[in-house]
Amino acid sequence: MTTLQAPFALIILDGWPAEGSLLSKAHTPYYDSFVAKHGAAKLTGAANAEMGHMVIGAGRDVPSMSSRIAGSINDGSFREIATLSEALRRAADGSTSLHLVGMIGGPDERSSADVAIEVLRSAKAVGVGSASLHCILDAVPDAAERLEEFRGELEKVGLGEIATVCGRHFAMDSAGNWDRTARAFTMIAFGEGEAAEDAIAAVRAHSGRGISGEFIAPIVVGGTLSDGDTVIFLNHRADEMRQLVRSLAIPESGGAEGAKPKIEAICMTEYDRDFGLPMLFPPIDNENTLTRVLTEAGVPVIQIAEPGRFAHATLFIDGGTIFEHPLKTKIAVPYNAPAGGVEPEMGSFKTADAVIRAVEESAARGMFIVSFAAPGMIEELGNDDRTVEAFQFVDTCIGGIAEAVKAAAGSAAIVAATADGDVPFLLIAEGPGLESTGTLADVAPTVLGHLGFDVPAEMTGSDLRKG
């Protein structure tokens, strides 16, 4: 059996382009020296960080959950999902009231307003007379405009009223900040929050004070929960819905305190296997991903990231399904973005320190997977100077990790999951280097080949090592 004799670090960056862009304005001595010594392949990137991590870990093209859902809407099979149609029939005959909870106006990697509209069209078609919408807002300055567009779509369908609104800072926390989740929970369950006659006017007032959609506190217009109500959670990304769904739908969850309505919950995807809740789109099991191949071969895999990228470095890199193994260790780096914005550093230094400590303390030689979010997330906010700072902070971090791995006689790879244009892929090891071009699906086969492991047949990517 092939074993790993020295540590290997797979460093995944978000928003780091192969060339040009704001990166050219940043001072990145470590990255520049790696490129000068080892060269860098240019890979075709992914549409978003979630898909980038999935393709990197799977070694093949994989269908995103958003594309699966969009495809089912386009071909009409969405309305034929038994779990959905049965719930809507119950709402149509008056057995239950219908509520929809999900992000509106955010990126497709989390949710889509099209899904909400399709559910409402399906509900209207079977005779549902009313539906309450609990809208979660993203980190955008034009949240009111997006919400107004969504309300216009509701009017076209002729079904659905906006009942509550709040930012994803409260409704989609994934770092165990139950105080935030409790604010969203009490808003939906009991109508606690800023009372308003018009949700859009209330959101516009907050935006006028410089508060982006992500941080808008709970706003209540009406339509809170009662026992027996059906609640459909629309988001398809699991990690950011887990706490809210647990607090609303799982008995004695330990989330928000106090009695809560007993609801019939339906999830868009599998938020947590232990919930045992019905879902519309079960996960697809991607066999023989990078982490599965290594752990089954006896190699420890240590996955490290801050909360904003923890699911990417664990769930998505594992193929998009929950995968546990005795040789897998997950280290969540403590970092919470301050209310109102994020810093260029984010949790980068804390993440790097955690990786370096793990490399230095590890008796077993393992695979260290680490994901840095700062460059991509800061660039989305539109501040060039802070984005340049983020590049520079992460450069220091990847330099420290590479030095720690080298001191332990190991090697490393650096790849960007997504960027505007091509993304770089570097193998920091002795050898002839990599071919000049490829795709993200080539990363896992290249890494396995470098480490001396057979590439499984399911990985359709190529080993980019020369010779």
Image: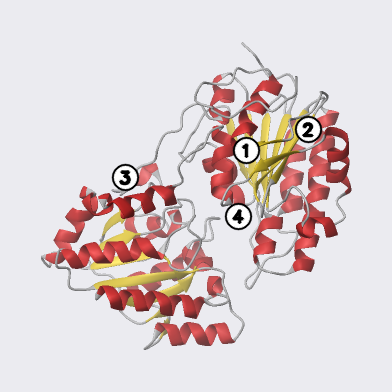
**Which of marks 1 and 2 precedes in the sequence?**
2
Check disc 1 and give the amino acid type: Thr
Front label number (2 vs 4): 4
Residue 324 versus residue 309 in the image, above or below: above
Viewed as shown, does residue 406 lie left or right of 441? right
**Which of marks 4 and 2 precedes in the sequence?**
4
Specify the farthest residue to the top: 1
Where does label 1 land, which residue? 439
Spatial distance from mark 3 to mark 4, Cα to Cα? 26 Å
Tell me residue 207's x, y (percent): 56, 82
Query: Which numbered tag is attached to residue 45?
Result: none
Front label number (2 vs 1): 1
Is the residue under label 3 in contact with that under label 2 (CB below 8 Å)? no
Check disc 2 and give the amino acid type: Glu
Tell me residue 198's x, y (percent): 38, 87
**Which of marks 4 and 3 precedes in the sequence?**
3
Where does label 2 land, which residue? 360
Viewed as shown, does residue 369 lie left or right of 266? right
Query: Which numbered tag is attached to residue 276?
Result: 3
Front label number (3 vs 1): 1
